[in-house]
Amino acid sequence: MKAKSYRVFTLSVLAVTASLFFDVLPAAAASQSIPLAPYTACPSVGKSPSCEALIVIAPDSSIAIYKDSAIGPYDGVEDTLIGVWNQSASSIKAITVNGPNTGLGQLDGDGLCTFSVPGCPFGPTGYEGPNTAIKTLASRPDSAEIDFPAGLAPGAQTYFSLEGELSLADLTVHQGPLAVTGTFGGSWAAPNLYYSYGGAHRYLGNVSQAGVNWSNTGTKLHISSWPGVPFRVHIAVSDVVSSDTFWAVTGFASNGAIPECTACDYTLNTVTFIRGTVDPLKDFMRTKVATHEFGHAVSLRHPKDVGLTQTKSIMNQGILSYNVPQAYDIGLIKAVYP
């Protein structure tokens, strides 16, 4: 029997959610300083006297985006000047900005350094500001990774620019890189996740142990049973009767534009066990399957899919002698959820 462990398909939910609508501030942590416009993390650039948008990493490491509706594109047409303010107690290495159908990563040469900005150029694209480096992928034109080579220290601010007049109703930001090799490129905005097991709960003990396995990795990732409202479900688990010959599948939601969005900011993924193939397995292996599928649900791929055939990993397919995440898996989680 050939085990297949993930399949992408469309769900009737959005995988990219609004961080902020125009001029509406999100609820903030009690100790968070709410920025007031104008956002002076940015200098005057072209027609923008200050930042059009401000990304704030809050003390609890959550991220909010703020918009100054009095400020337009710095080029007078479309491009956006963006500030970053780190209010957390930790140095930030990188953030990734996502905006479906924005083309924000399609840098076409009219970055902030096409204007007379002191210190320019800060990087090869001309869109960088101080202590920033911008990485984009042709396969992900609606995303950009913003690195802070020296680290963005607690309390520090800097700025950069991106392509397009960005509607913040469509933007999300998360800490970490655009895509880590060995992952699908997507991630959860916050790695404290809840699963809900519907139906007969046939493998509930194995699913519960899988959550414990990932929560005990010494990373920021925690997966536990949904405690009920007002919390939301991140991973919907079920088991079904099917003629499929693999053990389980992980489903990734659509973002409305991309029907199979493994590389989005995740809002709801699914894990479905196939009873006919999982029932004959020993309990040890059922837990391996559940832990493996949760790995997919947080963005991990099969090592062989990236050319690794000798790597010890819970994401390897087939029968294994272990059923918990290995050093390789833990390294990926730390990279995606720093």
Image: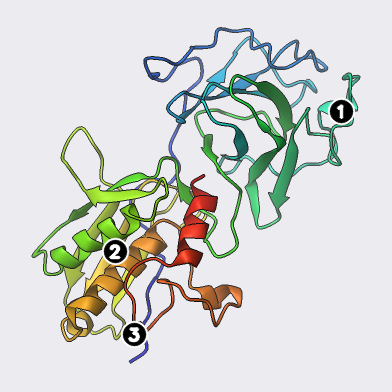
In the image, residue 207 sits, relative to residue 48, either above or below, namely: below
Q: Is 199 in front, or is 308?
A: 308
Residue 311 appears left or right of 245: right
Q: Mark 2 near mark 1, Cβ–Cβ under 8 Å?
A: no
Please state the horizontal and vertical placement of residue 325, each as a whole percent of the image: 39, 65
How dense is the environment of label 3, judged by Cα within 10 Å: few (below 14), some, or many (20 and up)? few
Residue 5 lies in what quarter of the image?
A: bottom left
**Element under label 1?**
helix
Name the kind of residue labelled 2 in the image.
Val
Q: Mark 1 near mark 3, Cβ–Cβ under 8 Å?
A: no
Residue 119 lies in what quarter of the image?
A: top right
Name the kind of residue labelled 3 in the image.
Ile
Whether residue 204 is visible, yes or no, is yes
Report the residue at 48% width, 12% height from top. 33
Circle 2 or circle 3, nearest the eye: 3
> Alpha carbon of mark 2 to alpha carbon of mark 1: how far?
46 Å
In the image, residue 217 sits, relative to residue 290, either above or below, namely: above
Q: Which residue is mark 2?
A: 271
Q: Which residue is mark 1?
A: 113
**Element under label 2?**
strand
Residue 110 lies in what quarter of the image?
A: top right
